[in-house]
Amino acid sequence: MTRSSEHERSGRRSANSPRIVHLDHTSDPGGAEFALMRMLAAEADWQPLLLLPPNSRGGVFTPVEGRVPIRVGGIVQHPGVSTGTWASLAGAAARLAVQTVATRLDRGFRTADLVDANTARAAAYGALAARSSRVPLVIHLRDFVDAASLGRVGFAMMSRIALPRADGVVANSQATLASARSFLRPDATTAVIASASGLRRATPGPRPDRPDRPLRIGMLARIDPWKGQLQLLDAFAEAFADGDERLEFAGGAPFGHDAFADDLRVRAAERGIADRVEFLGHVDDVATVLRGWDIAVQASLRPEPLGQNVLQYLAAGVPSIVADEGGPVEWIEHGRNGIRVAPRDVDALRDALVMLAGDAPLRTGIAVAASRTPGLLTDDEVMRAHAEFYGEVLRRSRPHPTW
């Protein structure tokens, strides 16, 4: 692997700070990649090195170039390895083997104090590389460890190869960690730390009254069928068929979902609300977008392990409606700092929208409580929580040789 950027050492690091290699299988825009980028941008207390396979798209890690060494090598890791023909699976296995060897031979890996795999794919080749090394391995769990979430092949790799080798596991919610427990060694160090989500805490208090403009409802999530944009669009159309309320979708359409974005536009036209639905695309300034919303929605069609958007809604003090399952229920107390509705139920979502839209005092109370939700962490606080966790893993792990 070759170095593509040089690290500017933070003043709070020393030569004795642990050398931690972060593995990610892509630089395309995804929740895991943004979370890692935000944490590294918070000036990590350790000496970080980011190892990536070649990738012709993306650039999530551009903001940390010049501050974090980024080394690129191996072979492109295509999406969708968990499904497909036997030929495509064989090709994916070959790519995984190449990446394992490239990772194991990289000098950064060989001299690391600890290796941190940021995604399920990275965990697979990271664990294989670590099998011939005594370097402690940490795995980030950002999705449930089951076939429904990871795919048949991805689940097999995670449960049989990666997790049994892990010295430490960081999960983004208690629900995520529970899904992995049976695959971990008894001595594995574990922690639940919410992903770095760029949180900016709003000042507790009522959201400003905006009588001069229509009510704005939004969803912050990448455009993807399982994120529930279609269900929200239908619920919105039924709740406000004749009103002037507006619906905004904030999020790009990575991973080949441009056609689904087009389908949503067609559906909005069919429902007669196309002039009141706006697709903002990927947004960098999330805080500004959330300040403009009166109601925010998370309506994923399968349980969310965390729901970074839910944390962002809470921190911004936006009254939110969330699906009543998965990680979000660990954060939302129904009727106090948000509203929980039956998942995959368009009628329930419609009714919640109507209720919140028609009750300004309720929205104000939820907004105040949302911004005061305990446990919300800034990116710097997430980084410090990881520094403590890495230190605990290193203390409990046996020493490994430096090549």
Image (cartoon, rainbow, N blue to C red):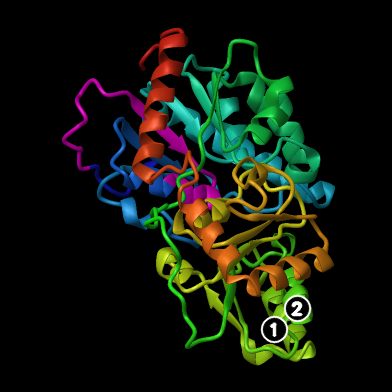
Residue 1 lies in what quarter of the image?
top left
Tell me if residue 55 can be seen: no
Magenta-highlighted residues: 8-36
Q: Main secondary structure of the magenta part?
A: loop
Question: Which residue is outermost to the left?
Answer: 11
Q: Position of residue 392 (x, y in %)?
A: 43, 17
Q: Residue at x 75, y 71 (%)?
A: 230
Q: Residue at x 39, y 57 (%)?
A: 202
Q: Position of residue 13 (x, y in %)?
A: 21, 30
Which label sits on residue 265? Answer: 1
Of marks 2 and 1, which one's residue comes earlier in the chain?
2
Query: Could you tell me which quadrant the C terminus lies in?
Result: top left
Residue type of the residue flagged with mark 2: Ala
Where is 161 relative to 22, above or below? above
Helix, strand or loop under label 1: helix
Q: Judge by depth and name the residue closer to the eye, 244 or 133.
A: 244
Is residue 185 found left or right of 149 in the rendered image? left
Packing grade of label 2 (10 A; few <14, some 14-19, many >=20) is many
Is residue 89 found left or right of 205 in the rendered image? right
Where is 41 relative to 355, above or below? above
Which label sits on residue 162? Answer: none
Helix, strand or loop under label 2: helix
Where is 274 relative to 338, above or below? below
